[in-house]
Image (cartoon, helix red, strand yellow):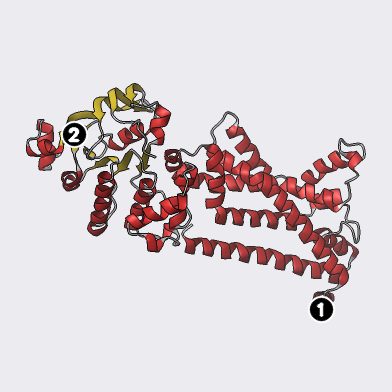
Amino acid sequence: MNDLGTAATLALGLIAEADATLAQIVGLSLRVSLIAVAIAAAVGLPLGALLAVARFPGRHAIVVALNALMGLPPVVAGLLIYLLLSRSGPLGHLGLLFTPTAMIIAQAVLIAPIIAALARQALEALWEEYAEQLRSFGAGTARAVPTLLWDGRFALLTVLLAGFGRASAEVGAVMVVGGNIEGFTRVMTTAIALETSKGDLPLALALGIVLMAVVLAVNALAQAVRELAARRGA
Amino acid sequence: MRQEATALPLRAEGLRFAAGGVEILHGLDFSLVAGAPTVILGPNGAGKSVLLRVLHGLLEPTGGTLRWSLPAEAAQRRQAMVFQRPVMLRRSVLANALYPLRLAGLPEAEAAARAALDRVGMAALADRPARKLSGGEQQRLALARAWALAPEILFLDEPTAALDPAATRQVEEIIGAIAASGTKVVMTTHHLGQARRLAGDVMLLLGGMLNAQGPAERFFAAPPTAEAAAFLRGDLVW
């Protein structure tokens, strides 16, 4: 109990003085996860919208696969990217393993299916309402997809926040492909895992508090988006 | 948008539509010509909405022929439709009116959209979120959005079904103005008073069959069939 109290005091001190190590780890975490979300969104949002609008053979199978991939364990995503990027793997010559780039790729692979599947769900309801009117206007699939992406913007923003929450909180993928190298690929979750096992509770606890704050902020933002959407009638 | 060639008249012969093994339209023969509104009357479930969707090309007929005076695709571009529950894009009122104009690639789209809003008395609401409008305002916006396209034919599916009397009157005035501007209005209603006020000619649809059709004046003065007479008296018809 005393240990915990001391650790908590030290943790708050690290946060208060914006400790350099702490700041570096938090900064890398946010950078990796934000870029991963951007990449996953660039792929996942149009794919989700297309699946909501278009009817083609194999669509059902893709939807099922995406829903299944939403539960992809992060370490498995990490393992797949590890196999691709390892020296003997097909992309080994790029020398990306154990770099922040590899971590971005792994997280993007992890959350792109989540974003696509959630976007499809959100936009399918919208499409049900819009379909006849857009067809009456003469809009084909190519025009309907951007229309849905724009008109579903509030719902999609919460989808992106869900993706960011998942990315910033996962430990398995970044651990496997990043290697948790101090000052280079160490992010909040991998640092917490390491420092806890080493017994350096203050840094682990400080990172834990920051991570919780990030998750809270993401949820507060999602709530704010929902309220704004309700006011705008979306 | 209005050129020399017109999509009307339209000739339907033996027009049928079935869905899921159930036939909804049982072989209709009629023609639509330019002029005053054609009002499709009939009780709920008679197939009125389905008929509008088939005419507008949203549903494919399962039998018979539907012959426009232009190739189907060109005829399609000269039509617009307003649905029973107006579909409001999650955008401003102005953006809603602009959407189909931009989609059609029309020049001066914004001026046309603003003029259309003005015609239905909604210019002051241009920047409001469309989904926050009242039911009557939404229906007026839907009419303005369709009217902005200056369609040759405008299909209206029960345009006042969910509106109160004041909003109904405004919407009827707009429909009258659209018809007076040269657009052929084809609308469904089960509101007899509305049909008397707006119709140039009437089609009575009962159980997916065309029971009676003709000029409105004659239809209301001397119903051509026993069923039409019963329908006008307010009796239940099948």
Q: Is residue A206 left or right of residue A152?
A: right
Where is mark 2, residue-wise? B238
Where is mark 1, residue-wise? A9
**Residue shown at 39% from the left, 44% from the top:** B149
Instruction: Name the amino acid, label 2.
Output: Trp
Nearer to us in this view, B202 or B229: B202
Instruction: Name the amino acid, label 1.
Output: Thr
Q: Is residue A126 left or right of residue B54?
A: right
Whether residue B135 is visible to the viewer of this picture, yes or no, is no
Please determine whether, in this image, residue B46 is positioned above or below residue B64: below
Q: What is the quadrant of residue A67 in the picture?
A: top right
Indicate the secondary structure of the residue bearing disc 2: loop
Q: Residue A46 at what x, y percent from top left?
A: 62, 43
- Residues marked 2 and 1 touching at CB (< 8 Å): no
User: Subunit of mark 2?
Assistant: B
**Residue shown at 52% from the left, 42% from the top:** A144
